[in-house]
Image: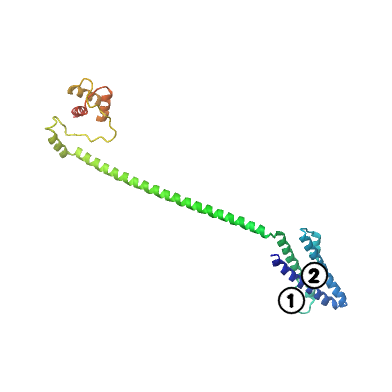
């Protein structure tokens, strides 16, 4: 993998050295003997190569020298300056010479990038371990996401089931309440109807003397068991009527039959449910 950065840096360095040597020889050859110009060009390229070789040696040892790096960049700036000066003084193709004047600095930059690559390079074992860790992290994240989605779907299913069950219960309760309300309304209408009262009176008069037109609705709710047989001395109808009337009128407004019956038995009196209700009807008439 190091060749990806080493080959471009080497190629640009070679072109830069050849170009610098040629420019120095041609430019200075007109003012001095060409051997002298060749020596000057080789000196610039030699200093450039010497500092580059020393930097590479230090990099191979895991070391670095700011002084050597500074000298190397100085030789690069000198080479670039020579190329720029030659391009500016050339009578023709000034733009073309300026276009290649940056090659020494480009070569230094590429070697800098190559050095950074080498300092951060890892072995195949390390890269394999990193890939394994990353893959393990991705697997765990995928499993966690799948678990969360499954739990969310399960909770959604449970909530839907509970909601539907609650809705069914609510519908059944509403239907039951409606039926009870209709039945109670029917009973209330029958209880308060004048024709119904006369019909019931005509039927029950022969069976129960002194029956009244008003009859009670059935009591819905818990009831208290009563003894099948009366305990203690039985009260006569007159005494029973007096006790029932006294309990019934003990509070304003008068007590209902249910409250009166509770207080009647709490006071220690005894009477069958039939006689007690008959007494209630007589005193409430």
Say which residue appears at 83% left-offset and 67% top-offset: 47
Numbered label attached to residue 162 = none
- Residue holding disc 2: 79
Residue 112 placement: quadrant: bottom right
Q: Is residue 17 left or right of residue 269?
A: right
Label 2, secondary structure: give it.
helix
Residue 72 at x, y percent in the picture: 80, 64
How crowded pointer 2 is (Cα within 10 Å; few <14, some 14-19, many 20+) is rated as many
Q: How many marks?
A: 2
**Which residue is located at x 83 percent, y 69 percent?**
46
Residue 280 in percent (x, y) is at 21, 28
Residue 26 horizontal side relative to residue 8, left or right: right
Q: Residue at x 62, y 58 (%)?
A: 131
Residue 121 vertical placement versus 170 (above, below) = below
Say whether residue 213 is left or right of residue 155. left
- Report the Cα–Cα distance between label 2 and label 1: 16 Å
Q: In which quadrant of the rendered image does the C terminus lie?
A: top left
Q: Is residue 199 visible?
A: yes
Name the spot of residue 124 as percent of width and height, x first. Answer: 67, 60
**Can residue 249 be seen in the rendering of this structure?**
no
Task: Look at the image and tell me in which quarter the N terminus lies.
Answer: bottom right
In the drawing, does residue 147 fall left or right of residue 115?
left
Residue denoted by label 1: 96
* 130 vs 32: above or below: above
Of residue 107 and residue 191, the one placed in the foreground of this image is 107
Q: Which image quadrant is residue 207 in?
A: top left
């Amino acid at each position: 993998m190091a060749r990806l950065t080493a080959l471009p840096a080497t190629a640009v360095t070679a072109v830069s050295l050849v170009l610098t040597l040629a420019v120095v020889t041609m430019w200075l050859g007109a003012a001095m003997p060409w051997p002298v110009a060749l020596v000057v060009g080789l000196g610039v390229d030699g200093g450039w190569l010497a500092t580059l070789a020393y930097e590479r040696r230090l990099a191979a040892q895991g070391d670095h020298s700011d002084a050597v790096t500074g000298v190397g960049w100085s030789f690069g700036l000198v080479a670039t300056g020579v190329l720029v000066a030659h391009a500016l003084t050339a009578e023709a193709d000034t733009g073309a010479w300026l276009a290649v004047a940056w090659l020494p600095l480009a070569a230094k930059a590429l070697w800098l990038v190559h050095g950074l690559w080498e300092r951060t390079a890892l072995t195949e074992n390390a890269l394999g371990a990193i890939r394994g860790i990353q893959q393990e992290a991705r697997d765990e994240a995928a499993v966690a996401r799948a678990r969360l989605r499954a739990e969310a779907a399960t909770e959604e299913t449970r909530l839907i089931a509970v909601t539907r069950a609650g809705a069914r219960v609510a519908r059944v309760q509403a239907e039951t309440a409606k039926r009870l309300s209709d039945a109670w309304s029917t009973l209330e209408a029958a209880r308060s109807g004048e024709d119904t009262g006369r019909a019931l009176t005509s039927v029950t008069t022969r069976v129960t003397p002194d029956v009244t037109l008003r009859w009670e609705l059935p009591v819905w709710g818990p009831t208290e068991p009563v003894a099948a047989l009366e305990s203690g001395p039985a009260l006569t109808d007159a005494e029973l009527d007096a006790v029932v009337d006294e309990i019934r009128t003990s509070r304003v407004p008068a007590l209902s039959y249910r409250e009166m019956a509770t207080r009647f038995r709490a006071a220690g009196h005894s009477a069958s449910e039939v006689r007690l209700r008959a007494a209630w009807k007589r005193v409430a008439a």
